[in-house]
Amino acid sequence: MYDPKGKSSTYLPWIIIILFLGVGALYVKTNPLGQSSIGYSSGYEGGKMIFMGVYYEGQAHEGFAFRGTNMNFDLDDPKSGLPNIEGEMTTIFIPSKVSWGDLPDFVPNSWRPLLDTIDNPVNVYEWSYKEGDITHFYRMEEWETKVYISLEAGYDSFGVLAEESNNKRIRNAEVWFEIETKPTWYFENAKRTYFAISKITVGNVVKEGRNIDKIDVNPESMGSNVFLFYEPYGGIPASDTEAFLGEAVDGTRLNPDLFGNTLYAMIRLGDFGTQQWLEALTQIRSQGDIVTFDLTVHQLVVGEWTVRDEQDITPPGVDNPNTPGDEGGYGRDSKVTKAGVNLFEFLVTKEGMLLLAGVFVLVVGFFIVTYGTMLMAMYTGSKRR
């Protein structure tokens, strides 16, 4: 016999799954700077910048202590000696696509209105050259994107003896970052699109501590460049914007070797640690130094068009590159595909895994309750017979 109630109940687990996945997609959409357990957020714009390691006294330290956009590294004994270097950072983002409320708590309130003052692209370069009957058109736009980084001296022990809180200072340690230049921007109808980071400059630095005069970091002056390299822990320094443009363009042809490279950035902690003092002659107080950086990441996006002499020589679609937040998204891909990408990126995070586990438990529980009730009813009915 047809049982409409029983029939409709078979759809319930799928309804539950769809609702939970919808919540996950909404989370991705409404949390563009949310951090994931593997360090990448689902809403990054431009290059991916993550903590890579610490270089100290001739040795590079990497590993589990550096979890993407978070780090917590102890240079020596877990409970004594030097303090920990604890770090937190945002992803690289386009200022116009992030609201103030999306920023983490460590970002000073006074910095938030400054995001509205950046009008991208800040520079535009256009040129062309002929190769036989083919004309190559290029348009290069320089975009100012942002990343915020906070470094703190943490301590696992507190006291008057050889404890991490007791005026222990880290000197000449280098915190290294890896930057992957694979944004999802594009130019409409361009044959190719290239990306590069030409430089990273300091917008603001805020120091916090018992005596901030003791804190020494480099770079720290506004407008100065962050150290950029083509190899980690030293090696060949990356070019600044002016030199980069000369090497990349050379007046005519684009040099693709300078685009799409993984870069490495470094911040040097010259004097950084804990400060401890006696308050009111009876109470021991301690505080770890904190330095927060507002960095401007200068990204170059280049579109290339090629046309033959008999074609219209005006390259199509030479307007600003579209970014993931623009209407239509991702060029070739539909909004459905974009939503699928956001959903997948969320599901591989810690929160996404917990969501899937919750869905699994609910579905299993549903089947146990549903079919367990049916079996009990059948068993009870058979006993009555």
Image (cartoon, rainbow, N blue to C red):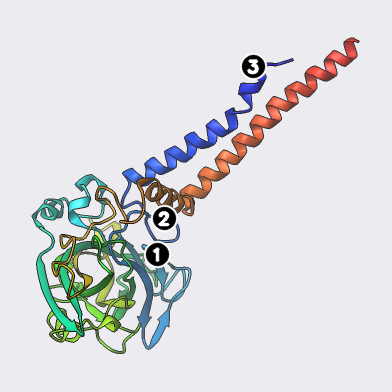
Residue drawn at (41%, 52%), measured in percent from left and top? 341
Q: Is residue 299 left or right of residue 234?
A: left
Amino acid of disc 1: Gly
Q: How crowded is the residue under tag 1: few (<14 C-alpha within 10 Å), some, or many (20+)?
A: many
The residue at which mark 2 appears reads as: 36
C-beta proximity under 8 Å, tags 1 and 3 = no
Above or below, 337 against 13 in this view is below
The residue at which mark 1 appears reads as: 68
For the residues marked 2 and 1, what is the alpha-carbon distance in whole angstroms?
8 Å
Circle nearer the N terminus (1, 3): 3
The residue at which mark 3 appears reads as: 4
For the residues marked 3 and 2, what is the alpha-carbon distance in whole angstroms?
43 Å
Q: Position of residue 158 (x, y in %)?
A: 38, 62
Q: Position of residue 250 (x, y in %)?
A: 15, 86
Above or below, 10 against 136 in this view is above
Circle nearer the N terminus (2, 1): 2
